[in-house]
């Protein structure tokens, strides 16, 4: 089984520069953490994981905002008034808006593929449903909490 190449510092720097931003240590650190993540991360999650590297809450927030506005990162509110961030990954689930599942017991957030939720426009439904311009957030118990 071929191993997946882990991104290197230069990969993160090139990605940041490709969208017209300066490559700074905090931006690289935020991208690195989002690359490692298996689910969307909140600002608080990133503060906890990057705090030991000397990055404060405001620096992380500003860089999340810059990376989101530049199109490298997506942000979603899953109904709990907490913004969560994830990388846009070409060819994967994270390319655009996609459904998320939140466990109502443990709070775990998972990304779902677009194919896992089928939207069927019905008479009287908003046109955004047919255009798939809606956000879908599913809630329930995850496999561990059932």
Image (cartoon, rainbow, N blue to C red):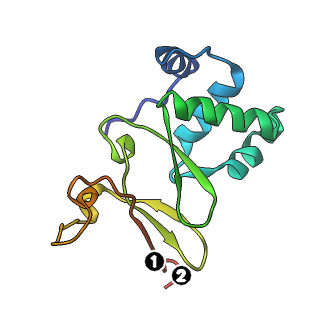
Question: Gap in Å between the C-alphas at discs 2 and 1?
Answer: 6 Å
Give yes or no for contact between labels 2 and 1 (Cβ–Cβ under 8 Å): yes
Does residue 30 appear to the left or right of 11 in the view shown?
Answer: right
Location of residue 49 (image quadrant): top right
Write the residue at 52% across / 14% down: 20
Residue 71 placement (x, y as % from top left): 47, 31
Residue 55 placement (x, y as % from top left): 80, 33
Residue 93 placement (x, y as % from top left): 35, 48
Dot label at residue 145: 2
Quadrant in the picture for the N terminus: top left
Location of residue 28 (image quadrant): top right
User: Within 10 angstroms of label 1, few (less than 14), some, or many (20 or more) residues?
Assistant: few
Dot label at residue 127: none
- Report the number of discs: 2
Location of residue 3 (image quadrant): top left
User: Within 10 angstroms of label 2, few (less than 14), some, or many (20 or more) residues?
Assistant: few
Q: Farthest residue toward the bottom? A: 146
Q: Dot 2 lies on which element?
A: loop
Q: Farthest residue toward the front? A: 124
Q: Farthest residue toward the left? A: 123
Write the residue at 37% across / 49% down: 97
Q: Which one is in front, 126 or 26?
A: 126
Q: Dot 1 lies on which element?
A: loop
Q: Which one is in front, 56 or 62?
A: 62
Q: Which one is in front, 2 or 33?
A: 33
Does residue 95 appear to the left or right of 62 in the view shown?
Answer: left
Give the labeled residue for mark 1: 143
Residue 73 placement (x, y as % from top left): 51, 37
Q: Is residue 7 above or below residue 84?
A: above
Write the residue at 31% across / 52% down: 133
């Amino acid at each position: 089984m071929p191993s997946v190449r882990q991104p290197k510092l230069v990969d993160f720097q090139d990605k940041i520069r490709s969208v017209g931003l300066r490559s700074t240590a905090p931006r690289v650190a935020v991208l690195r953490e989002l690359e490692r993540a298996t689910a969307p991360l909140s600002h608080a999650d990133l503060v906890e994981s990057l705090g030991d590297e000397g990055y404060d809450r405001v620096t992380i927030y500003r860089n999340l905002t810059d990376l989101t506005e530049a199109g490298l990162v997506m942000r979603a509110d899953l109904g709990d008034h907490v913004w969560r961030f994830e990388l846009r990954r070409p060819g994967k689930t994270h390319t655009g808006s996609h459904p998320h599942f939140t466990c109502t017991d443990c709070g775990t957030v998972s990304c779902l593929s677009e194919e896992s939720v089928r939207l069927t426009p019905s008479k009287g439904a908003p046109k955004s449903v047919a255009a798939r311009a809606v956000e879908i957030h599913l809630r329930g118990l995850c496999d561990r909490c059932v």
